[in-house]
Amino acid sequence: MNLIRTGRAAAVLLAGALALAACGSDSNGSSGASGTSSGGKIACQSGSIKASGSSAQKNAMTTWINTYQEACSGATINYSPTGSGAGVQDFQNNQTAFAGTDSAASGDDLTKASTRCGSGNQAMNLPMVVGPIAVAYNLPNQNGLVFNPSVLAKIFSGTITKWNDPAITALNSGATLPDATIVTFHRSDSSGTTDNFTKYLTAAAGSDWSFSHDKVWKAPGGQGAKGSDGVAAALKSTPNALGYIEYSFTQEGGLGVAKIDNGAGPVELTPQNASTMVASAQVVGTAPDLALKLDYATKTPNAYPIVLVTYELTCQKGLSSSDLGLTKSFLTYIASSDGQGKLDAKSGYAPLPTDLVSKVNTSISSMS
């Protein structure tokens, strides 16, 4: 397996205190409860916190952190997009105030996170970012190719190897596809994006996918790239390439984005179609934990089926006094109408459904 590395650092610190306009009457606080004030203004908290994890939400975090720090001159928030697995470990090891993870922490991971929060305290998964996962390709003069779960499973397991395979051409009538080998890329690091993509294949492709789901890529063949940046760079630099990547990383252009036939016809990847998918999700966590169960095999018309939900993993109770105020204030902001409003088509994300936002705010309010 070849490892593709970009010139960018694997861990990018999104930090800095941009001293513009301080806001809110709580701007000098360093701990305690603080949220979004009436009128949508940020109720600022000062201090410095560290967080790490999901690279899928990197672009959303960049925007949110810049906006928060521009409003709150005394705040510094450092987010390192090291990948979901590394982020959860950092949080468990008490190195960060929260972790971004593209699969809700569960089982032993959630137990260890709760132990980090202190005796009798509970860690909680807070869904915050809907990130459609694009099936992206580097194939000149081809727009809006269509795939279904069976064909994708066969491509990524190595059963289908050519772009002009009859199974692909049958889904793309009128397209002239080359007699070229498909170069597939997957994440080389532990990744919630991989976990969600393989959850989709496991649920929707049936016997055509026999590798179940995992944060670590299990199928043979293909080439690995580290982080979302790495996969994007590999796809753009490799002719005839195909891979899975968060939609936000296709916004710079240069890659085709496939439509997915979920059984009710081809569905274009749009924020609205991704939100349609998430709106039917079930909350399976025990409050204040809001872990979701997504129906990846949905046949709902206009529901784009390959999505991930990035969660912020933190303590309901048990954060240090130096971390609590800023963490709670920042999470309150990103769950606000202004914060979620930044997750639009231009950003490559989709906002949380309204009823889910209400539950998230209730959980954040319980932090102490």
Image: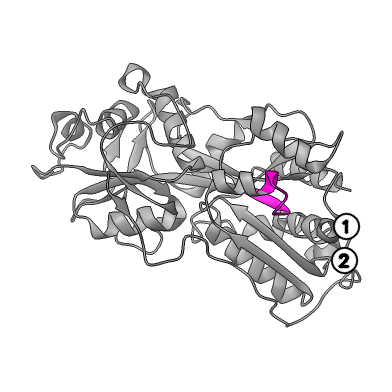
Residue where numbered disc 1 is placed? 321
Magenta-tinted stretch: 91-100
Q: Amino acid at mark 1?
A: Ser
List x then y, in percent, for residue 113. 72, 39
Looking at the image, residue 27 lies above or below residue 254:
below
Q: Secondary structure at mark 1?
A: helix
Measuring 86% from the left and 36% from the top, which residue is drawn there? 119
- Residue 107 lies in what quarter of the image? top right
Question: In which quadrant will I find the N terminus?
Answer: top left
> Which disc number belongs to residue 270?
none
Q: Residues within 10 Å of mark 1 (few under 14, many from 20)?
A: few
Residue where numbered disc 2 is placed? 30
Looking at the image, residue 263 lies above or below residue 306:
above
Magenta stretch: residue 355 in it?
A: no
Magenta stretch: residue 97 in it?
A: yes
Q: Secondary structure at mark 2?
A: loop
Q: Amino acid at mark 2?
A: Ser
